[in-house]
Image: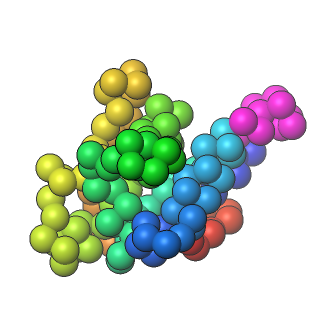
Amino acid sequence: MATTKLGFIVQRTPYKSENTKLALTHAISSQSVEVYLNDGDLVTADIAFVGDGVLNCLKNQKAMEKYGLTSTESHIKNCLLLDLNVMVCKEDLDKFGLSENDIVMDAEEFGADMTVKVVPFSEITKMMEDVNHLLFF
């Protein structure tokens, strides 16, 4: 039984770029590989929002209404629905004057049990050290 751990670090703003959605889509799709794995093998994905990337987590995005696009907010909620570990850097939230009330914290309406974790950067650093593959977006 082997577990391959993937880490996705989102550090760019959500504006004028598809980086965040690429990170979230890759993390979500990593959970569909079980058909290619040996029995007992797993792939896990952790996603961390750091620096300007924490702005991706703002709630009440209106992307579908205004642009006809799926919002980053709904992608984050789909990650929670799949029980992926989603972390947001506490120090960077503080830097922007944001709190847990300002960001997506759960996906209860989707039936998800997982919640976003607001953590110190030291915990994100530990996650980066523990993964097999680390991708920056």
Residue in view at x 27 percent, y 49 percent: 59
Is residue 7 inside the magenta stretch?
no
Residue 13: where, in percent of width, then height? Answer: 41, 72
Residue 100, image x, y percentages: 18, 53
Q: Please report the bounds of the magenta region as a residue range.
A: 32-42
Q: In this view, does 76 lie above or below 20?
A: above
| Residue at x-position 83% and y-position 31% | 35
Measured as percent of width and height from the top left, residue 27 is found at: 61, 50
| Residue at image coords 62%, 69% | 135
Of the pair 61 and 51, the residue shown nearer to us: 61
Q: Which image quadrant is residue 122 in?
A: bottom left
In the image, is 94 to the left or to the right of 52?
Answer: left
On screen, residue 10 above or below 104: below
Colour basis: rainbow
Q: How many marks?
A: 0
| Residue 137: image location, x then y, percent | 56, 71
Q: In this view, does 110 lie to the left or right of 91?
A: right
Is residue 41 one of those drawn in magenta?
yes
**54 horizontally vs 36: left or right:** left
Q: Is residue 137 above or below residue 66?
A: below
Whether residue 9 is visible, yes or no, is no
Image point (26%, 74%), residue name: 92
